[in-house]
């Protein structure tokens, strides 16, 4: 499912269950030693996926321990992201020479719990997804919005070292091409001489799952501060 959303320079692995061969390094075991069984399973399998994805770019696996704000500490010269939800785990990685940042998130294709949408979205976004729900029924657009913002954050934080609130990014969806764009609303969006005002990602909905990904290549051209996601295509809603 995830492979169709990614460019060729990204290696990915996914699992729709918890394979018995998945194992943790002792240092990883210590992180979840007191966790409930379901948490241990997802923690183990997503690292099993990470090992497979790293093998795809020829990088040996080493223990992936949580770093600042829980972000995994990837091997030197590697960018990556992981996600897990009920019935699904995935990891995406790339060599730093090719990829600047990666974000991925998976969610069950179900409505957000009551009250969550207001906490994670802007009024303009709520208006847009209400319109999407009436014009293109299918995925739960509120949950998809949440997932896309999670992917944006997972790409943004390791790249910049700065947190990003849900209200700091405004999203538009292309419901026909499976794409989304996020306009960052924070004062400073430059990093390493690049302007990151607008980030582009992709999404898929299938078999009760929603998956969003964001892959920022080192070769991507900077996007002007004056640009807005509204200017790209009339298909973005």
Image: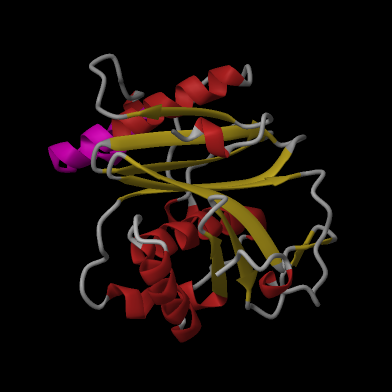
Location of the C terminus (image quadrant)? bottom right
204 lies above or below 152: above
Residue 224 occupies quadrant: bottom right
Residue 189 x/y as whole percent: 72, 70
In the image shown, does 22 or 231 lie closer to the viewer? 231
Say above or below: 32 vs 116.
above
Direction bottom: furthest residue: 123
Which residue lies at the image location 59% right of the left edge and 52% below the top edge? 201
Residue at the spot 42% in from the left edge and 57% down from the top edge: 147
Q: Say if residue 74 shows up in the picture.
A: no
Residue drawn at x 77%, y 35% as measured from the top left: 97
Residues in magenta, as a range: 27-42
Q: Is residue 99 visible?
A: yes
Residue 234 percent coordinates (x, y): 66, 68
- Residue occupying image coordinates x 18% and y 43%: 35
The x, y position of residue 104, in whole percent, is 49, 46
How many marks on residues?
0
Q: Which image quadrant for residue 123? A: bottom left
In front: 186, or 12?
12
Task: Tell me residue 211's x, y (percent).
Answer: 42, 46
- Does the stretch in magenta take in 96? no
Colouring style: secondary structure
User: Would residue 75 appear left or right of 36 to someone viewing this image?
Assistant: right
Magenta stretch prevailing secondary structure: helix
Q: Is residue 38 magenta?
A: yes
Q: Is residue 223 left or right of residue 155?
A: right
Is residue 204 shown above or below 42?
below
């Amino acid at each position: 499912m995830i492979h169709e959303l990614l460019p060729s320079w990204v290696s990915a692995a996914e699992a729709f269950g918890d394979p018995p061969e998945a194992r943790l390094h002792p240092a990883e075991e210590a992180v979840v030693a007191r966790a409930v069984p379901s948490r241990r399973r997802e923690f183990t399998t997503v690292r099993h996926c990470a090992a497979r994805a790293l093998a795809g770019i020829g990088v040996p696996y080493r223990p992936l321990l949580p770093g600042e704000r829980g972000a995994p500490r990837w091997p030197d010269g590697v960018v990556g992201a992981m996600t897990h939800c009920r019935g699904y785990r995935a990891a995406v990685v790339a060599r730093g020479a090719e990829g600047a940042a990666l974000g991925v998130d998976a969610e069950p294709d179900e409505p957000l719990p009551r009250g969550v949408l207001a906490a994670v979205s802007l009024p303009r976004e709520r208006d847009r997804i209400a319109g999407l729900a009436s014009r293109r029924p299918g995925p739960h657009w509120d949950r998809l919005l949440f997932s896309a913002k999670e992917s944006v954050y997972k790409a943004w934080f390791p790249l910049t070292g700065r947190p990003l609130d849900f209200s700091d990014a405004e999203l538009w969806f292309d419901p026909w091409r499976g794409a989304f764009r996020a306009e960052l609303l924070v004062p400073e969006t430059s990093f390493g001489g690049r302007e990151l005002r607008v980030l582009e990602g992709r999404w898929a909905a299938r078999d009760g799952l929603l998956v969003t990904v964001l892959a920022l290549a080192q070769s991507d051209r900077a996007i002007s501060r004056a640009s807005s996601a509204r200017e790209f295509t009339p298909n973005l809603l």
